[in-house]
Every structure is written in C-alpha cells, then in structure tokens.
C-alpha cells in the first residue's frame, strides 16, 4: 500500500504515519548495508590530478565558487576534450610569475565525460514536472522560506539552507509570510537533482534544524549531530521524491553517515510532518 503511495503522483498528505515510519526504517536499514558506487571513486582522483593548484589558489577557488570540483584553464579543458560554455563566469587565481589567470569549474564546461562525474550521490534521476518544482517553491514561501537558484555554486555543492534576519514589518509584503529562512539551489544541476536538493534543504527547515517556527508549527531541534540532521533531511527528500518521480541516491549518501546510534536519535514523526509541509498544496494554518 505504501509503495503505491510512494510511486503515485502526490495529491495530498502522505500515507499513515505508521506506513511512513516503516518505509523510513527500511531506508535507514538499506543505508547501513549500502556501499557507495565504486565508479565515483574515480572522480576525486580525476580532480586531484586535474586541479594541480597551490594551497592559496585552492582557497581563492573555494571563496569564489563554493563546492567547486575540478578547475582548469580553457587550454587544459580543451586538452581533455571539453569546451567552456559561452556564458561561463571565470574564477580568478594567481599566475606564477605574473598577475592573475582565469580558470573554469567543470560545471561550466561540456564535452568528453569525466570518470564518475554522474555517480555522485548529490545527483538524482527520473522525471519531475517543472510545474511540480515551482509549486513546491510556492508552498515553501507560505511557510516563510525564500527559495532562490544560484549560478555561483560548484558541481559538488547542491544547495544550502540558512536562517535569515527578518525585514522590518513595514517593509514586508502583505501578500506572503515574511521570509525567515533562505534555501539556495544550484541552478547548474538538472531538474530532478534540483528538486531533490530543494526537498532536502526544506527538510532541514521543517525538521527544526535551523530553529523553531515562530507560529509553533515545528519545534527547535538544533541539538542534533550533523549525521542525525542529514539522516532526517535526506529521509524527507526520499519520501517526497519517490511520490513525485525523482530518484535520489539516498542510500548511497546516507551509507557514510548512518549508524545505529544516530538512527535511534532521529524522529520519524518530524520527518513525516516535514515531508507533508514540503508537499503543501494550500496555505498552512496559523
């Protein structure tokens, strides 16, 4: 019954809490047993060989392009069989015996496939309607979450979530709730990956990892460990994605984080409620 609910189009609230809790427990059990795909082991090796940056230049890349993977000059990428996209924004690094030089992150290039490039657990497969993605962003705004896409993230950073300061009430539009949280999604990723990222980051917000909702809709749960927060947020993304058409690589991602101790500390009820808020179709109750 729950498997049918997961694979069908999401029209309302999730199935009974008991069914969701059983599915979440199954996900965590699979994560404990899962091994990351061996092909992805090739990608870090490629990055290490290709980057060849000094410590200072590596820091400059990280500041300008958080989550950057492999970077190189136009000539370096051409030598590997890839070209820089016309609208790519260069990263400035120091040039030995000269002023500066420009390099480009792998996400700003196209061409010859890089070993393990698509095997990262950040990526999702499947099909997500653009309308579904946009509705999810609108639903988030009703809970005080501002969602924005950014071109400034590298390949290895899918998204972020953070609490933000409130605008003065006089400056807050009356048409929607004042933004209390900001979620940013990597605009360079494909739609299934962006949807999975959005669901994951909203999971952090609605599970209380960034603090309590001022209207009491969820409590503050900021004392969890990093692993526990990621287990909950990824479980939210997994529930939502499977009801929408996306297939995140949740087991692979959580396999490096899951432990019996952390799993016992997560709240299936918080995950269940957060997933329903991600899927909200109407304005939430005050």
Image (cartoon, rainbow, N blue to C red):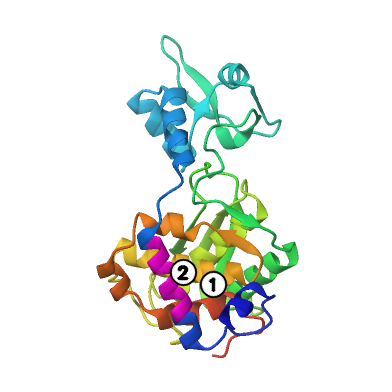
Which residue is pictured at 62% across the width and 55% down the height?
125
Outermost residue toward the top?
97
Q: Which residue is mark 1?
A: 239
Give the percent coordinates (x, y) of residue 153. Answer: 53, 45
Query: Magenta span: helix, strand or loop, mainly?
Result: helix
Badge 2 crowding class, 10 Å Cα cut-off, few under 14, some 14 to 19, many 20 or more, is many
Give the percent coordinates (x, y) of residue 60. Answer: 42, 32
SS for tag 1?
A: helix
Badge 1 crowding class, 10 Å Cα cut-off, few under 14, some 14 to 19, many 20 or more, is many
Label 1, label 2: how far apart the Cα atoms are:
6 Å
Which residue is pictured at 53% across the width and 25% down the height?
103
Query: As displayed, is residue 59 above or below residue 192?
Result: above
Give the quarter of the figure containing the C terminus: bottom right
SS for tag 2?
A: helix
Bounds of the magenta segment: 22-31
**Quadrant of the rendered image containing residue 244:** bottom right
Which residue is pictured at 60% across the width and 56% down the height?
194
**Quadrant of the rendered image containing residue 94:** top left
Q: Are marks 1 and 2 in contact (CB under 8 Å)?
A: yes
Query: Does residue 157 appear anywhere in the picture?
Result: yes
Query: Does residue 166 appear anywhere in the picture?
Result: no
Q: Which mark is residue 183?
A: none
Query: As displayed, is residue 44 above or below residue 267?
Result: above
Give the percent coordinates (x, y) of residue 135. Answer: 69, 71
Q: Which residue is mark 2?
A: 235
Specify whether 239 is left or right of 7.
Answer: left
Query: As displayed, is residue 65 above or below residue 86?
Result: below
Tell which of 187 and 166 is nearer to you: 187
Give the percent coordinates (x, y) of residue 196. Answer: 57, 61
Specify whether 66 is left or right of 56.
Answer: right
Task: Indicate whether residue 156 is drawn in magenta.
Answer: no
Tell which of 6 and 188 is nearer to you: 6
């Amino acid at each position: 019954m729950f498997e049918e609910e997961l694979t069908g189009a999401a029209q309302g609230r999730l199935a009974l809490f008991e069914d969701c809790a059983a599915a979440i427990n199954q996900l965590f059990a699979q994560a404990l047993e899962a091994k990351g795909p061996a092909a992805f082991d090739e990608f870090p090796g490629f990055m290490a060989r290709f980057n060849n940056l000094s410590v200072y230049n590596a820091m400059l890349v990280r500041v300008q392009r958080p989550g950057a993977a492999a970077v190189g000059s136009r000539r370096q990428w051409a030598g590997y069989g890839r070209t820089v996209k016309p609208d790519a924004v260069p990263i400035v690094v120091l040039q030995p015996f000269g002023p500066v030089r420009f390099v480009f992150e792998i996400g700003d290039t196209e061409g010859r496939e890089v070993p393990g490039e698509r095997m990262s657990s950040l990526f999702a497969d499947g099909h997500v309607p653009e309308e579904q993605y946009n509705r999810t962003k609108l639903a988030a705004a009703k809970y005080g979450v501002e969602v924005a896409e950014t071109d400034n993230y590298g390949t290895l950073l899918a998204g972020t979530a953070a609490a933000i300061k409130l605008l003065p009430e006089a400056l807050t539009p009356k048409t929607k709730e004042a933004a209390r949280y900001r979620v940013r999604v990597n605009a360079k990723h494909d739609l299934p990956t962006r949807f999975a990222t959005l669901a994951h980051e909203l999971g952090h917000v609605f599970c209380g990892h960034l603090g309590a909702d001022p209207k009491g809709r969820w409590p503050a749960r900021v004392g969890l460990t990093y692993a526990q927060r990621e287990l909950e947020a990824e479980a939210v993304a997994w529930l939502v994605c499977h009801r929408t058409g996306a297939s995140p690589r949740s087991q692979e991602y959580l396999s490096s984080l899951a432990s019996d101790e952390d799993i016992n500390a997560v709240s299936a009820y918080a995950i269940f409620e957060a997933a329903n808020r991600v899927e909200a179709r109407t304005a939430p109750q005050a």
